[in-house]
Image: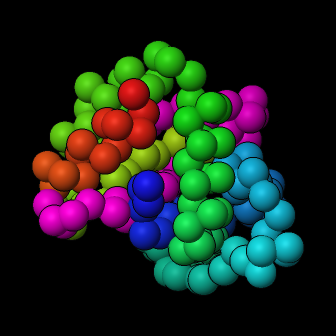
Amino acid sequence: MKIAHNVRLSVFCHEGEDCASIRKGLSVFIPFSLEDNRLSVSEKKAQGFEDRQIRIYDLFIQKDRLIRQFLESLKQKLGPETIALILRQLDSRVDDDCRFFLRFDKQRLLEDDMLWLTDRGDCYHTAVSIAAYPARKEKAVKVVRDFFS
């Protein structure tokens, strides 16, 4: 059963941060070789507050097999307490366009290789476009709930 149409994983690197480590931190989420699957992390530059430079690292996955591997790996790394929290917050984590969002604390991931949910903006951000038919929030919530249950 198809769970999602695509996954987007992104992170910001602000001026003065170790961008190489932040970019490397994306590998914690990826259970497959990017090179072997012809995927790459894109890098964009943007202007932040007070004209500070920001780099945005972005990985977009749209092959069904890789999406499934990504989601199964993520589920294993989260643990039962985190999954229970996600399920309690599910209504606020799925939007009206059937996208499921998770944010992971950037500092905890860089320091401890831990996936720790956060509501702050300084994070690794995942957006999963849920395959729900008909494409309604209620159906998407059910797909995510079934996947994590």
- Please provide percent x and percent y for residue 95: 21, 56
Q: Quadrant of residue 84?
A: top left
Task: Give 132 or 28, whichever is nearer the viewer.
Answer: 132
Q: Is residue 50 visible?
A: yes
- Please provide percent x and percent y for residue 38: 77, 81
- Vertical placement of residue 34 versus 132, above or below: below
User: Looking at the image, what colour scheme do you see?
Assistant: rainbow
Magenta run includes residue 37: no
- Quadrant including the N terminus: bottom left
Q: Is residue 54 visible?
A: no
Tell which residue pokes out farthest to the front in this image: 1
Residue drawn 52% across and 42% down? 104
Task: Give 36 or 126, whichever is nearer the viewer.
Answer: 36
Task: Give 126 or 69, whichever is nearer the viewer.
Answer: 69
Residue drawn 56% across and 36% down? 75
Q: Quadrant of residue 63?
A: bottom right
Residue drawn 43% across and 69% down? 5
Side of 16 where 85 appears, left or right: left
- Quadrant including the C terminus: top left
Magenta run includes residue 118: yes
Residue drawn 26% across and 25% down? 88
Query: In the rendered picture of this protein, how many numbered marks are placed on residues?
Result: 0
Magenta stretch: give its range: 109-136
- Please provide percent x and percent y for residue 59: 61, 70
Task: Give 51 or 94, whichever is nearer the viewer.
Answer: 94
